[in-house]
Amino acid sequence: MIICKKGFMIESSHFLPRYVGKCKQLHGHRWELEVFLEGDINPDTGMVVDFSQVKYIVQTRVIDVLDHKVLNDIIENPTAENVVVWIQKVLSQHFDNVIRLRLWETADNYVEL
């Protein structure tokens, strides 16, 4: 099995309505999304996945929906954990070989599913 990773950036804002602290206020992040897919090498193409297909699906189904948006308008309580679960639900409709999603909220904080 081979693991392939494709990365993406999302610029968005959110606030955590159930949080006690400064994150209760509207603020922004430059999220980094890493999508890991696993599979065998297709003998005809020599690839596990077509990165351009992954890019198109993630771009149109995830990035275009979340980028430069207030995440609270899309996800009720947009913690990093809830955002990555939302992304997984969307991508599971298009891929059956996503084995890991890593969503960086800051340079030193990420969640992984």
Image (cartoon, helix red, strand yellow):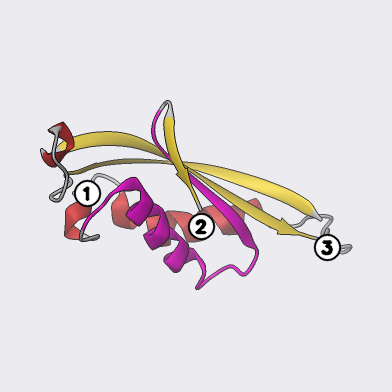
Where residue 91 appears, as percent x and y from the top left, is: 49, 64
> Magenta region: which residues?
77-106
At label 3, which amino acid type do we have? Asn
Where residue 42 appears, as percent x and y from the top left, is: 83, 63
Where residue 10 appears, as percent x and y from the top left, is: 36, 42
Q: Which residue is mark 2?
A: 56
Residue 61, placed above or below residue 27: below
Q: Which residue is mark 1?
A: 69
Q: Is residue 102 left or right of residue 13?
A: right
Extreme bottom residue here? 93
Q: Are marks 3 and 2 in contact (CB under 8 Å)?
A: no
Q: Is residue 74 left or right of residue 55?
A: left
Does the magenta portion include 104? Answer: yes
Q: Which of the two marks, 2 or 1, is nearer to us in this view?
A: 1
Q: How many marks?
A: 3
Residue 45: image quadrant is: bottom right
Instruction: Identify the residue shown where x is 58% and y is 45%.
Output: 6
Instruction: Give the mark nearer the N terminus: 3 vs 1.
Output: 3
Instruction: Give the mark nearer the N terminus: 2 vs 1.
Output: 2
At label 1, which amino acid type do we have? Lys
